[in-house]
Image (spheres, grey):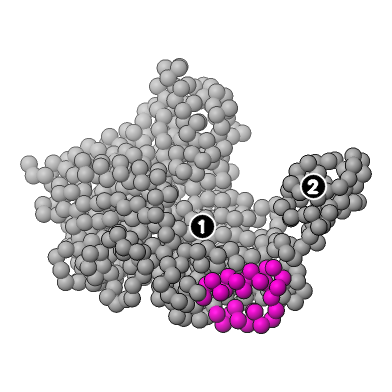
């Protein structure tokens, strides 16, 4: 029996074995153990459940999973009873474990702690998002009380996150994993694979949005027998964690995508470039690589004679500029991570001077689904020029923060108000910033715009890798522009004068504005300088870094003018332009603020309204935060 035949039999057996693990004939409890869950105590909940199971001799199956996406509700714990809907519990704590376990043994649910229910068998994702053909788990969410956070989503990239044990390859195979690789290696030529990806309309999810199939074709046709592929997992945007969650919750989807890409392009080696701040993602990737090698997918692939592909992990040191592909290549080679002029493009001369293809985590995770379901299916999702879905980390002033995946073309309104649950404390929406620190700020009056590559570009923003920050009326847009410019200024590699010195000069002007020291001419200079940086910089960091400035100048110029002309910050955020006062009519002299003041700037006795000594106040905000009567105000 050939290797290919042996693994085909094993693959079927592993599917059955994996299904038995995912849907055992006993009660199963799965704890979300991604970084977001662990940060909120999921590890302690898991350990407490493990002790209860051991102490009672229960036959309950305890497992771990990745991030289900609803990070606001972590720790998330799923209970699955044979033949019954899956029950998802939110915000479960160690103190609740005893009551939770007692109800579990009695076959009951703690209704007050239930977040939602899902169909009880393998039905966990929308039917149109059936992940991997006839062997795949399919269906749609059945939300408990129609939970909007999930009902508006369509999970393709996140199809397995939160539903399988990311450290068990058999559970991935049970969900259709590696069947797309088998299809490619046994029924398709490399050229046919590339045509399928081109036909799907998939665009690179790393930020630039370049057509993935076309990128593969360039590398395939490049001269030379030695070629490389790279996964860019150097996720550096503040508040973004899309790549991290996929690697922590479904690492095999990325590995399978890279194997398919390697076959199509003709590469023998691949590199996963992961930022070192992602230790859990790296740990799970290492485990997945070991398993994929042991089971005959990596290395000399047992599914096809003559096809061999190896993967290694390189930990990046956290330089934001390494998100640019030529800088990333330089980093892998041990050089200073600086962008280089193109052409030649990496597809012609990349890693070690050889043809190289680079895609990010989300792009690679899409590949197996496209191959399994077909290009026409994938192209039917999204808009005319922006196909498929997009993963976003939804953070900021929304009630429901988390990781979401929506079809391209979904409106900002649906994302903010349906999935996100609206603005916290019933405040007014002010802006949504997309695309990370180089993205633009979209004002509230554009809330009905669709989110795709074209509409975002028209609004002065970018898709980026998928960060989405929601801001309310308490945010100062000048301060926001200053924050992101400070970040990109710090992360500039320094190679381009326009980026290195231009961003520094822009930051100085923004600081003058927030300090109340600027005049009208500074606004003119800031706008001209931003356009110059955009036009003259060599790489994507410099050409997009002025977006926060230009978009806020375009949509929120009145705030800039208030800072310059009136020396006031309308949002009372910029410390130089407001003071803390105590409203004596509201003050109840409770005494809570006085001991919290680090400079003893608050005067007043018990039952006597307090006052703030302006000359001593450092505007730390402690009094504002602790006052129970809203008596401390900003003026």
Q: Earlier in the sequence, mark 1 or mark 2?
A: 1
On screen, residue 514 versus residue 407, left or right, reads right
Q: Position of residue 401 (x, y in %)?
A: 56, 51
The magenta region covers 502-529
Residue linked to disc 2: 600
Residue drawn at x 68%, y 68% is 514
Report how far apart the C-alphas of labels 1 and 2 lie in the structure.
35 Å
Residue drawn at x 63%, y 60% is 471
Query: Is residue 454 part of the magenta span, yes or no?
Result: no
Which label sits on residue 75?
Answer: none
Q: Residue furthest top?
A: 56
User: For the C terminus, which image quadrant?
Assistant: bottom right
Above/below status of 431 relative to 42: below
Q: Nearer the viewer, residue 475 or 394?
A: 475
Query: Is residue 508 part of the magenta span, yes or no?
Result: yes
Which label sits on residue 238?
Answer: 1
Q: How many marks?
A: 2
């Amino acid at each position: 029996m050939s290797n290919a035949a042996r693994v085909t039999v094993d693959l079927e057996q592993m599917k059955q074995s994996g299904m038995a693990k995912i849907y055992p004939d006993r009660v199963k409890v799965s704890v979300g153990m991604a970084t977001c869950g662990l940060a909120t105590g999921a590890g302690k909940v898991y350990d407490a459940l493990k002790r209860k199971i051991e102490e009672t001799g229960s036959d309950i199956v305890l497992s771990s999973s990745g991030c289900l996406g609803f990070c606001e509700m972590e720790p998330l714990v799923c209970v699955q009873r044979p033949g019954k809907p899956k029950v998802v519990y939110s915000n479960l704590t160690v103190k609740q474990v005893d009551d939770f376990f007692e109800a579990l043994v009695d076959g009951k649910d703690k209704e007050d702690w239930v977040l939602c229910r899902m169909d009880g068998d393998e039905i966990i994702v929308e039917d149109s998002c059936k992940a991997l053909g006839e062997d795949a788990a399919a269906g749609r969410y059945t939300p408990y009380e129609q939970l909007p956070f999930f009902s508006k989503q369509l999970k393709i990239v996140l199809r397995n996150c939160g539903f399988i044990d990311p450290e068990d390859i058999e559970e991935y195979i049970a969900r259709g994993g590696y069947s797309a690789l088998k299809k490619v290696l046994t029924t398709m030529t490399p050229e046919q694979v590339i045509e399928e990806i081109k036909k799907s309309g998939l665009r690179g999810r790393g930020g630039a949005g370049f057509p993935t199939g076309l990128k593969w074709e360039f590398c395939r046709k490049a001269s030379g027998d030695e070629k490389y592929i790279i996964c860019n997992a150097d996720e550096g945007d503040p508040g973004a964690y899309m790549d991290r969650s996929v690697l922590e919750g479904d690492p095999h989807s990325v590995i399978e995508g890279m194997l398919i890409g390697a076959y199509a392009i003709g590469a023998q080696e691949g590199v996963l470039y992961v930022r070192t701040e992602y230790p859990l993602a790296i740990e799970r990737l290492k485990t997945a690589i070991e398993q994929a090698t042991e089971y005959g997918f990596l290395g000399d692939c047992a599914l096809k004679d003559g096809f061999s592909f190896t993967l290694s992990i390189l930990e990046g040191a956290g330089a934001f500029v390494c998100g640019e592909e030529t800088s990333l290549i330089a980093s892998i080679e041990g050089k200073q991570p600086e962008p280089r002029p193109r052409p030649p493009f990496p597809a012609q001369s990349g890693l070690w001077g050889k043809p190289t293809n680079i895609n990010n985590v989300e792009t690679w995770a899409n590949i197996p689904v496209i191959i399994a379901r077909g290009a026409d299916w994938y192209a039917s999702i999204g808009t005319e020029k922006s196909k498929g879905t997009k993963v976003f980390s939804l953070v900021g002033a929304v009630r429901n923060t988390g990781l979401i995946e929506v079809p391209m073309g979904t409106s900002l309104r649906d994302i903010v108000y349906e999935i996100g649950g609206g603005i916290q404390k019933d405040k007014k929406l002010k802006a949504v910033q997309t695309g990370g620190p180089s993205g633009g700020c979209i004002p509230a009056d554009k809330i009905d715009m669709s989110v795709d590559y074209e509409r975002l570009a028209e609004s002065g923003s970018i898709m980026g890798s998928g960060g989405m920050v929601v801001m309310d009326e308490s945010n100062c847009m000048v301060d926001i522009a200053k924050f992101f410019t400070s970040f990109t200024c710090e992360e500039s590699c320094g190679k381009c004068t326009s980026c290195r010195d231009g961003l520094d000069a822009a930051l100085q002007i923004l600081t003058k504005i927030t300090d109340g020291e600027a005049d009208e001419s500074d606004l003119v200079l800031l706008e001209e300088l931003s356009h110059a940086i955009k036009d003259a910089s060599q790489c994507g960091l410099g050409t997009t870094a002025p977006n926060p400035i230009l978009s806020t100048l375009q949509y929120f110029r009145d705030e800039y003018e208030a800072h310059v002309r009136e020396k006031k910050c309308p949002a009372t955020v910029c410390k130089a332009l407001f003071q803390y006062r105590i409203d004596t009519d509201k003050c109840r002299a409770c005494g809570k603020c006085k001991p919290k003041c680090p400079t003893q700037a608050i005067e007043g006795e018990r039952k006597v309204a307090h006052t703030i000594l302006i000359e001593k106040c450092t505007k730390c905000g402690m009094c504002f935060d602790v006052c129970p009567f809203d008596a401390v105000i900003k003026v």
